[in-house]
């Protein structure tokens, strides 16, 4: 497999002028229904997409559940924010297309293409040929999918979920909500009611997807929420690696992002899911920034299946997400590799859940938290070994690094073991950059700031190396940008 | 034995007093080292040997209460450790630090680039660097695998010490301070380390070798031997002084130098 | 509104509170105010059940306690002899011993070795004779609004033990809280207050035992103030019957350079929660916390241990181990807090569980909350069965499987029990451990 060419950013003067490198606003006409949410808005979203009845009904079921009494945001996480006025949000914002719809990439709104070029997304086919198939979601609407032909020949479906609802209703019907039911949690329910688009991928039996599939998410319109929905199914014996990148422009107000991702791996199948999350984190005083309240869960449904999550979370004002694995199939494997960074006033409460149900299921959790400025970083993770999980194994390692004395690092693991043959180990440490390490590097002539980055980068190494190569470079770069001014 | 070298010293320590917390460790140390010379500083545990090398390299945690450290004619007391390193001071640590997630090769390349930049040299292309490193590593009997591993992580004691000397050879400083580089080495490793030091030795290099034992001096012949006791150099001489120490221990030198002389 | 069982149980507390009015009148005003405040709090907050059940009670449901009614015994339900105590707890020779039966002082089996420079006495007596001193300390560390059980204890405690010393106390103090057999469920509220002055040394052993097998409820509070440079060693033995309930609070507050060592041994109770809440209040203090819990049948034991590093240069070590059999469940919630400015804190906690049955459950939540950057903190947790490889190794040396298993379990427990510095106590706990687990018995027989 060709090494994937990921994002080669071309920074403009304008971007470099601000701290947040990716904070530009694209000026295109947006088709925005009024703010607020009610059954009519849900119906409108569904109608805009020309959805079948069953889909509309599913959305309404979720909506009705969402408005039920006493149904609220989860309160157990260690994040704080003022109450969100859900009636003050646009639930749908699609870029207005000049024509019926792009037949080829040439017809895509040039402003959009320019916007993606600015992000360094290889939207043009020849660029995509270097090895990444990109589905770009712009304010929740999928705008173009590259590399389509090659995937089709292999029987791989990759594109907007709105399209999949039309073209592959049997797959969507079977799997949508099968891992994250609409009643799962407050944000997931909201997403189920109003999701506007997202990515759908299906890899047929025995196929090893030869390229990295990638979606680039970007929030553009002010005052809109982004509610994308991703569904990936790896059929028996297949393999797919999927990447997602996220940015949002700088906004003075908070933006809500409530996505749902569901992964299903059947017998002997493997899904590798990587995220570089760089939503706008807010400014130095904590103004603005994205509320990233995301439900991600994978079901290793088949025997010998594997689901692997890798995430690098550097953006968002608040991150609340727990990419999880339900290890249902015997011998199935779950992995979670995470780097979460909180600088300035950022808050993150992130981690994973590994639910061991099948025999000889194995899971690995490697979580690295970095706190700087006044950032509050919490790892929260559950390892649950069910009585049926004979011979289950888990290894968890959580390390926190503190930079400065005003930040906080928290580790909250939950370990529930109900099978004596299970074996689980959990380790955690919290420390700062060690003076001895710093001295050692500096004694060899390396400047303090560089030495700090080397140590921080080394701290994250175990996670970065799980990313596709270019993504790893990108991650390390992101980390450096996000930490600028806090070290050295 | 009086110093015969009339070159201007590269390192000049004058009446150096250093404390750690409330404890005064160095109590008026004087030492002059010129290019082309190898000095051995010997002394019992706790005499201030490591403090001396750390202070010259600028390690935080030490308070200099009095005296001067002159390097190439200027005081370096206000300089950060990396500035000193870029000026050509190298310290082989007694306890090399482990650096998780940082590969040895990457580390050496970053350090070498920093030094080359300071010396006004051009960047080495990756291929050139790799070739250069390979040769240096071979000379130190260094397994190629150790280059890919994280710096000192999971290295044996001997591997760590060899890694220090390898770094010295790669970074090519002017003044090398070797802090008990011989401790904990078996005889084979000691020979490899000594060979590395002897190859480094030359008319434009100065070496200060700090040791507890005379053993390494069988392999690296010093020009001068100094005995450090209770934070002061109580006796200086040629390499024969080391043998004397080996035979008699340090006790006989615990008197003030004036009386002993 | 229909009367819920919980509301009925709360009414019962009101009746009890009213019934004790006369007794309270004999008490100093501050204590009456304290009890009133505590009871108000309890009435307002109630037990942490249903919608009030928060994160701290995630794994433990106290509904059985909240919904039940317990009687406050107004007289001891049994009399004990010295031989009885020695039979129950054969390790306190040479120690001071203070015994309470159903909350009432039992002078016939108590023997206080009163040193000149110290005060070891009943709390009730101390309140009368040392009023201002007790006033300055009682409920200062374990505040009535900490939670429902502390509020109830503060409202209803009848007696307990008071220790004050500013020098090393030669003999350990053994406090025995006994609940005798009653036809209906009874409740006791033991209260222990230890004030260790500058450089004082105290060894305290608390033993909680039941004489019968019927359900009862114990709601103890132990406050320990450690002055500068003092050392307190605290053994807490929970040996009550497996139908009983126990919700306790232990609150050590560590002054500068003081050392608190605790060994918690839990082999009894059906539903237990012990909230050990350590405060590092002075720089350089050291807390060494160890625990061994053995569960079987349907026991549910929940240890919540928090260590609050409020001052710099503190050190804490926590090692808890559990051996779980049958359908029992053990919960361990450990939290290390490092407050802003508490630099150079060095904290480590570890929880290990050995599951002997496929129906047992171990839940661990060893969390860290850190707000200072110059710290060294870590934790570890493991769970599993006796390692097959280890058993194989022993068997390959000619040891049969059960004996091998017993040896390994004993080894597992010994990491905690070896820390018990009092020989007779250690021997007792080792034997008790062996008896507690039927599989041990099988192993012994084999």
Image: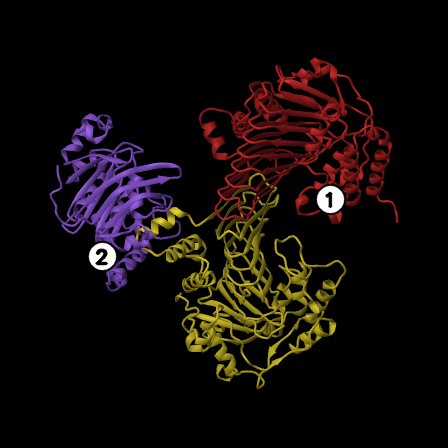
Q: Position of residue A48 (x, y in %)?
A: 66, 78
Helix, strand or loop at mark 1: loop
Residue annotated with mark 2? B132
* A196 on left or right of B134: right
Write down which chain is painted purple.
B
The outermost residue toward the right is C1
Residue annotated with mark 1? C48
Front-most of B115 and B97?
B115
Tint applied to chain A in the drawing: yellow
How are the residues colored?
Answer: by chain
Q: Position of residue C407 (x, y in %)?
A: 52, 26
Mark 2 → mark 1, Cα distance in angstroms: 69 Å
Write down which chain is painted red.
C
Res A156 visible:
no
Foreground disc of the pair 2, 1:
1
Q: Quadrant of residue B121?
A: bottom left
Name the residue at 58% across, 58% down. Answer: A321
Q: Is residue C272 above or below residue A484?
A: above
Q: Residues within 10 Å of mark 1 (few under 14, many from 20)?
A: some
Which corner quadrant holds the C terminus of chain B?
Answer: top left
């Amino acid at each position: 497999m060709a090494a994937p060419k990921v994002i080669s950013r071309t920074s403009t003067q304008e971007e470099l002028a601000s701290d947040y490198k990716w904070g530009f606003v694209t000026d295109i006409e947006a088709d925005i229904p009024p703010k607020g949410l009610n059954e009519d808005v849900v119906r409108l979203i569904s109608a805009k997409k020309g959805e079948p009845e069953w889909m509309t009904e599913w959305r309404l079921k979720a909506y009705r559940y969402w408005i039920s009494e006493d149904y609220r945001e989860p309160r157990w996480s260690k994040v704080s924010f003022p109450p969100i006025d859900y009636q003050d949000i646009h639930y749908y914002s699609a870029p207005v297309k000049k024509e019926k719809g792009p037949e080829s990439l040439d017809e895509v709104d040039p402003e959009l293409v320019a916007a993606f070029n600015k992000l360094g997304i290889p939207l043009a086919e020849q660029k995509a040929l270097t090895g990444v198939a990109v589905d770009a979601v712009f304010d929740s609407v999928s705008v173009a999918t590259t590399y389509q032909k090659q995937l089709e020949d292999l029987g791989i479906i990759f594109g907007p979920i709105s399209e999949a609802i039309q073209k592959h209703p049997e797959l969507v019907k079977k799997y949508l909500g099968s891992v994250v039911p609409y009643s799962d949690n407050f944000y997931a329910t909201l997403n189920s009611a109003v999701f506007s688009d997202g990515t759908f991928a299906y890899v047929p039996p025995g196929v090893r997807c030869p390229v990295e599939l990638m979606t680039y998410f970007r929030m553009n319109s002010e005052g809109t929420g982004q509610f994308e929905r991703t569904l990936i199914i790896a059929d028996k014996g297949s393999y797919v690696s999927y990447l997602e990148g996220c940015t949002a422009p700088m906004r003075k107000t908070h933006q809500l992002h409530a996505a749902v991702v569901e992964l299903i791996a059947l017998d002997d199948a493997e899904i590798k899911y990587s995220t570089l999350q760089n939503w706008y984190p807010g400014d130095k005083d904590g103004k603005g920034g994205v509320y990233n309240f995301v439900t991600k869960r994978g079901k290793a449904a088949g025997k010998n299946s594997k689901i692997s999550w890798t995430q690098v979370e550097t953006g968002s004002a608040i991150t609340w997400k727990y990419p999880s694995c339900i290890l249902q199939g015997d011998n199935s494997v779950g992995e979670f590799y995470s780097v979460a960074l909180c600088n300035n006033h950022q808050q993150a409460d992130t981690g994973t859940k590994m639910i061991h149900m099948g025999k000889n299921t194995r899971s690995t959790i490697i979580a690295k938290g970095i706190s700087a400025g006044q950032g509050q970083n919490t790892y929260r993770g559950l390892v649950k070994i069910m009585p049926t999980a004979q011979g289950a194994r888990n290894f968890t390692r959580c390390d926190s690094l503190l930079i400065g004395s005003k930040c906080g690092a928290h580790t909250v693991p939950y370990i529930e073991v109900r099978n004596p043959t299970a074996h689980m180990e959990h380790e955690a440490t919290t420390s700062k950059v060690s003076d001895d390490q710093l001295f050692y590097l500096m004694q060899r002539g390396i400047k303090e700031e560089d030495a700090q980055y080397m140590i921080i980068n080394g701290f994250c190494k175990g996670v970065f190396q799980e990313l596709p190569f270019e993504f790893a470079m990108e991650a390390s770069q992101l980390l450096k940008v996000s930490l600028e001014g806090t070290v050295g | 034995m009086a110093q015969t070298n009339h070159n201007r010293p590269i390192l000049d320590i004058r009446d150096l007093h250093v404390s750690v917390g409330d404890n005064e460790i160095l109590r008026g140390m004087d030492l002059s080292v010129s290019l082309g010379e190898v000095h051995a500083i010997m002394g019992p545990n706790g005499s201030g040997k490591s403090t001396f090398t750390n202070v010259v390299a600028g390690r935080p945690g030490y308070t200099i209460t009095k005296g001067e450290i002159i390097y190439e004619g200027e005081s370096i007391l206000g300089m950060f450790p990396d500035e000193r390193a870029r000026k050509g001071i190298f310290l082989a640590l007694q306890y090399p630090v482990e650096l998780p997630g940082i590969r040895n090769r990457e580390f050496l390349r970053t350090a070498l680039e920093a030094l080359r930049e300071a010396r006004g040299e051009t960047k080495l292309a990756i291929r050139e660097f790799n070739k250069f490193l390979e040769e240096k590593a071979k000379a130190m009997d260094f397994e190629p695998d150790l280059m890919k591993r994280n710096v000192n992580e999971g290295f044996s004691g001997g591997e760590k010490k060899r890694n220090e000397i390898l770094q010295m050879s790669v970074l090519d400083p002017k003044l090398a301070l070797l802090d008990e580089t011989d401790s904990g080495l078996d005889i084979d490793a000691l020979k490899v380390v000594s060979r590395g030091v002897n190859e480094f030795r030359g008319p434009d290099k100065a070496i200060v070798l700090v040791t507890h034992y005379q053993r390494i001096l069988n392999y690296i012949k010093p020009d001068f031997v100094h005995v450090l006791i209770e934070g002061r150099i109580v006796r200086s001489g040629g390499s024969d002084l080391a043998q004397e120490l080996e035979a008699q221990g340090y006790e006989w030198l615990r008197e003030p130098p004036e009386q002993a002389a | 509104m229909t009367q819920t069982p919980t509301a009925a149980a709360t009414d019962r507390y009101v009746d009890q509170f009213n019934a004790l009015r006369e007794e309270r009148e004999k008490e100093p005003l501050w204590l009456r105010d304290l009890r009133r405040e505590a009871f108000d709090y309890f009435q307002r907050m109630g037990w942490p059940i249903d919608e009030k059940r928060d994160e701290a009670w995630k794994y433990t449901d106290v509904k059985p306690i909240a919904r039940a009614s317990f009687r406050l015994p107004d007289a001891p339900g049994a009399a004990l002899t010295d031989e009885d105590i020695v039979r129950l707890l054969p390790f306190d020779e040479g120690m001071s011993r203070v015994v309470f039966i159903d909350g009432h002082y039992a002078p016939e089996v108590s023997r206080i070795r009163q040193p000149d420079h110290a005060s070891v006495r009943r709390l009730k007596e101390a309140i009368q004779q040392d009023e201002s001193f007790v006033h300055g300390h009682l409920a200062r560390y374990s505040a009535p609004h900490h939670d429902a059980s502390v509020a109830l204890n503060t409202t209803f405690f009848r007696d307990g033990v008071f220790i004050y010393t500013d020098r090393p106390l030669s003999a350990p103090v053994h406090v025995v809280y006994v609940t005798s057999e009653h036809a209906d469920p009874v409740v006791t509220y033991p209260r222990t207050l230890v004030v260790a002055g500058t450089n004082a040394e105290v060894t305290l052993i608390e033993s909680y035992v039941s004489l019968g097998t019927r359900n009862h409820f114990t709601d103890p509070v132990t406050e320990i103030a450690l002055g500068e440079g003092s050392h307190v060693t605290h053994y807490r033995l929970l040996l009550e019957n497996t139908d009983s309930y126990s919700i306790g609070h232990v609150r050590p507050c560590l002054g500068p350079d003081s050392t608190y060592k605790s060994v918690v041994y839990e082999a009894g109770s059906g539903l237990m929660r012990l909230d050990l809440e350590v405060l590092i209040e002075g720089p350089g203090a050291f807390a060494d916390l160890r625990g061994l819990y053995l569960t079987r049948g349907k026991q549910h034991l929940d240890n919540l241990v928090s260590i609050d590093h409020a001052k710099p240069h503190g050190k804490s070590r926590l090692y808890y181990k559990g051996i779980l059999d049958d359908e029992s469940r053990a919960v361990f919630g450990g939290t290390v807090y490092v407050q802003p400015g508490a630099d150079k804190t060095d904290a480590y906690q570890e929880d290990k569980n050995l599951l002997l049955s496929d129906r047992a459950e171990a839940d661990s939540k060893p969390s860290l909350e850190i707000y200072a950057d110059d710290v060294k903190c870590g934790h570890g947790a493991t769970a599993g069965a006796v390692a097959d490889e280890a058993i194989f190794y022993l068997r390959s040396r000619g040891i049969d499987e059960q004996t091998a298993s017993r040896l390994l379990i004993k080894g597992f427990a010994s990491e905690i029990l070896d820390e018990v510095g009092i020989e007779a106590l250690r021997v007792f706990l080792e034997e008790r451990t062996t008896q507690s687990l039927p599989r041990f018995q099988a192993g012994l027989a084999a």
